[in-house]
Structures are given as C-alpha cells and as structure tokens.
Amino acid sequence: MSIIIFTGLSLSFSDAEKILDAEYMPPVKRGDIDALLDSREDIEIIGIIDGVFHQSPAVSHKEILRALKKGIIVVGGSSMGALRACELYPYGMIGVGNIFEDYKTGVIDSDDDVAVSLNPETLEQMSDSLINIRYNFSDAVQEGIINEDEFNELLDVAKETYYPKRSFKYVIMKSSLDDEKKMLLLSYIEKNKYDIKTLDAQKVIQHIKKIKEEHN
C-alpha cells in the first residue's frame, strides 16, 4: 500500500517513521497533491498534517476532492489537515484528533489558530500556535495556576499577536498579570508544556497505520 504523508513541522519525519513506514513529504502547498495525482498511479492513502498557510497558496479543496474521487483515502488532522478535514469530511475526507473536533464544533474557526512560523530549510517551528497556547493555558486553569478571567485575557493577547511573534513567553509578558503570577505561569509552562498538534499528528499516522493493517 503506497502512502504519502505531508508533515515535518508538527511531527518530524524521523518521529513519524517510528510509527509507520510511509513516504513523508514536507508541508503541503497548493498544487502538490495535483502533481502527485498527475505523476503517480500507485497512491492509496494521503495523510495531510502540515501545510503552508502564508508563504505560498494553501492546498486547495479541489485537489483533495480530486484525490477522493480517484478512490484515494485522505486523512487529515493536527494543522492544515484538521482545517481541510473539517471542511471536507462531508465529501469523504477523514478527520482525526482534538483539533479537527475543535474546528468541527466551532471552538476554533480560523487558520490562524494552527499557524506557526517555520524555518523552511529545517522545518523548525519558530513560534507557538494559538491552539497550543489555548490548550496549555486551559490546563493551567484546571491546575489553579490562573483563573478564567486571566485565561481569557491571555487568549485575547495571543489572538492579537501576529502569529510569527506568538510564543508562550511573549503572551504572558504582554498580559496584565502581576509579576509573581507571570513567573508562576512561566514556570508551569516550562515544566508542563505539551504540543497538541504533535499529539494529533501522531493520531493521524496511527489512524493511517490502522487502515493499512485492515487492508492487508
């Protein structure tokens, strides 16, 4: 079974390969899927995790629909994959993970929620996503580090920050929290921070692995 998965940012190729032996490609941009469909006849599954948002045009709905029409299974989650899966699941695209569900239920509704800046050569993430900030600060509320009002203010600051500058530290320091609370929250994030996009990316690959096993 020939499998193509677009990732590299939310989950590195090396970490992805530990879950599933597949052909991994860098974040998808417009035209990439059309190019694959025009040049390959062996593709059975396409996984979309990461995609380009602002550096060049994003992958179009039409090329994903074209892949689905050809009988290719398309699975998405985590980042661009979650956004496109939310828009196209009525047409057969499979959505996986918490972020997909957040888009589907209207908790989030913009590509800005998952956008990050990256080093195009190394695919190193250079900023923090709004969705990851939301999840981690929400956990901080549950742990009693901040209250709901402080959470809402921090989220507002994060939303108002242009995505390449967005980071946990920047958002915390720009807020009106007192110095003691800022240091407490920074310490909490440093010790407990996780990346929901990475966790969802793993779920996408695990789901594709399950599909592969069911077809063998």
Image (spheres, rainbow, N blue to C red):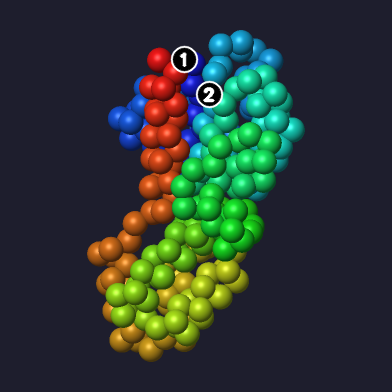
Q: Residue at x 34, y 57 (%)?
A: 194
Q: Earlier in the sequence, mark 1 or mark 2?
A: 1
Q: Is residue 31 visible?
A: no
Specify the amino acid type for callout 2. Answer: Ile
Q: Residue furthest bottom?
A: 178
What residue sits right under mark 2 in the picture?
Answer: 45
Asked if marks 1 and 2 touch (Cβ < 8 Å), the reply is yes
Specify the amino acid type for callout 1. Answer: Met
What residue sits right under mark 1 in the picture?
Answer: 1
Q: Nearer the viewer, residue 174 or 7?
A: 7
Secondary element under disc 2, as helix, strand or loop, is: strand
Secondary element under disc 1, as helix, strand or loop, is: loop
**Quadrant in which residue 29 is drawn:** top right
Classed neighbour count for the residue bearing mark 1: other residues with Cα under 10 Å, few (<14), some (14–19), many (≥20) = few
Q: Is residue 97 above or below residue 190?
A: above
State the count of labels: 2
Classed neighbour count for the residue bearing mark 2: other residues with Cα under 10 Å, few (<14), some (14–19), many (≥20) = many
Label annotation for residue 24: none
Q: Residue at x 46, y 47 (%)?
A: 97
Asked if residue 102 lies left or right of residue 178, the reply is right
Q: Nearer the viewer, residue 171 or 110?
A: 110
In space, the residues marked 1 and 2 are separated at their CA atoms by 8 Å
Asked if residue 26 lies left or right of residue 210, the reply is right
Q: Residue at x 38, y 89 (%)?
A: 178
* Image coordinates for residue 20, horizontal then vertical, percent: 36, 26
